[in-house]
Amino acid sequence: NRKGEDKETIDYASSALTLFEQLDDKKGMGISLNIIGQVYFANGDFKNAAKYFKRYINNAILTQDSTEIASGYANLGSAFSKQQNYDSSLYYTKKALSIQMKLNALYSIGNALQNMATDFQKKEMQDSATYYYERAAEYYEKVDSKAGLAEVYFNLGVTEALRGNFNKAIVLQEKSLGISRQIGELFLQKENLFNLSKNYERIGLRDKAFDLYKAYDVLSDSILNENNKRYIEDINAKYETEKKEQQIVMQQIALDQQQAQIKFNYAIIVAMCFGLLLLVIIFLLLRNKARKKQEYLKAENDLKLREAYINASIQSQESERKRFAQDLHDGMGQLISSLRLLLGSINENATTESRLKVVSKSETIIDEMQKEIRGIAFNLMPQTLIQHGLVPALKEMALRINSTGRVMVLVNSFDTPDRLSEVQEISLYRTVQEWVNNILKYAEATQIEIQIVGHGDELNITIDDNGKGFDVTVLEKSTGNGWRNILSRVKLLHGEVEVDSSNGRNGTILIAKVPLTIPEEGRVANKDNKIPIGTDGITVR
């Protein structure tokens, strides 16, 4: 497998590095150090990658090779960027850029500028990000690097979208998509299609957004199939050439060993064997310790999650009981008292006409009592949720809210299953209900859109409103039960939830993602599922 091949590469490169050090071959040492750093980087071990890139830089400084020094600084900057240490990343990338400017290495300059722009974007310094992306584009144009231009235009589009300039983001990413198609860059095509779909949706062109998303979905499948095909071809090629490559490597190692000091060969081999055995033992012990620690942490986290969910459930139940008692006291209690007074007045009204009026008023009060009971029952547990599932229950909730005339709630769904498990349906319904109640209470919104979308084995729920934004950090400091209930319910389903909002900005988006495992026949791909509910309860197409 890939990890095994990478470990083998590191082993060979490490052996070569030892021999080159014995021969004081600085060129060979630099090549070996760079290879080891690149393999660690490709496997996501950025700390080890940074360690070898630093050694690679020091070796290049000794040889006074400016090209390798610049390459080492650029690689080291990328390793720090992957560790989210953006200040260090910018520091080393600027050092690389300074050398590349002197060498007039136009393509490398473009890459360095783009890496700096990406770091500024991660630091949420969008003006600086835009400036460096545009400078990178200038250098890519000088060398006619279409791949570089496609990537820059895509990143500029992301930056503009983060600023809320969705139309400008669309123009840039359409440009990137065109270049990506021209050069056959499938991954960038896929990313552009996905981001364009989101941006068109944000400006209200949902049909266009849906078409782009379908194109993204088709391309994703195509890329997956292509990757599988390449993987099979690589295995076949490896099978055919493995023996020849091993012979070449062994011959090279034998040649290098002959050039080393013969009198130390036996001692070195013995030391290496003992060292390797010791490393294997240490590795096995550390891996076993890490696995046990991971299992312990997982069990501890699961226990904390269950405790949090139980506490939140208890608090939520207590709140529901209090509200239920208040509803009965304020609503039903007053209606029953009124009915008792009316019925008691029958004896005081001797005429038939007066008694008929009392009966009529009593019927009106009984109708109101019936509505009150239905409202209380709906709040406790909607029958639609029990009998028909999540989406119909959310549409019924939207209909009740829309009937007030204060807010328009839209419920859209696509590729969602007919039914989920009882725990999933109740938890997701209560999550949506809790967040919508918060919007109604605080956001002063006039429109709320709820989207339920199935993505393979995942269900995404998005709640988007046009009300007042807020600082999302207040959620982490919140002492109320609402946000804790939402978190505990989503975590119970092994999902995740995030909120996008800020002070002074209209609109807030909540996104909940939960894993979903259902038979394929249980999934309904209904193009007409995107149906808003009108205030009169009639579906509008």
Image (cartoon, helix red, strand yellow):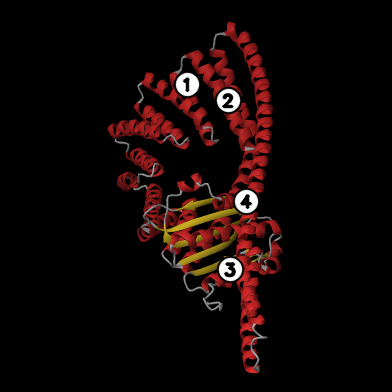
Between the residue at mark 3 and the residue at mark 4, the CA separation in whole angstroms equals 23 Å
**Is 18 rendered above or below residue 181?**
above
Residue at label 4?
315
Task: Name which residue type carries label 3.
Answer: Met
Task: Name which residue type carries label 4.
Answer: Gln
Between the residue at mark 2 and the residue at mark 1, the CA separation in whole angstroms equals 13 Å
Q: Residues within 10 Å of mark 1 (few under 14, many from 20)?
A: many
Task: Name which residue type carries label 1.
Answer: Met
The label nearer to you, 1 versus 3, is: 3
Which mark is first along the chain, 2 or 4?
2
Kindly check if marks 3 and 2 are in contact, taking CB atoms under 8 A apart as contact. Answer: no
Q: Secondary structure at mark 2?
A: helix
203 sits to left or right of 269: left
Q: Secondary structure at mark 4?
A: helix
Q: Residues within 10 Å of mark 4 (few under 14, many from 20)?
A: some
Which mark is first along the chain, 1 or 4?
1
Kindly check if marks 3 and 4 are in contact, taking CB atoms under 8 A apart as contact. Answer: no
Most foreground residue, 320 or 218: 320
Residue at label 2?
12
The label nearer to you, 3 versus 2, is: 3
Identify the residue shown where x is 44% and y is 19%: 26
Q: Is residue 165 visible?
A: yes
Q: Secondary structure at mark 1?
A: helix
Residue at label 1?
29
Query: In x, y percent, where is residue 114?
Result: 37, 42
**Is 370 rendered above or below residue 106?**
below
Between the residue at mark 4 and the residue at mark 2, the CA separation in whole angstroms equals 60 Å
Between the residue at mark 4 and the residue at mark 1, the CA separation in whole angstroms equals 64 Å
Identify the residue shown where x is 50% and y is 45%: 476
| Residue 397: mark | 3
Most foreground residue, 530 or 496: 496
Identify the residue shown where x is 68% and y is 23%: 285
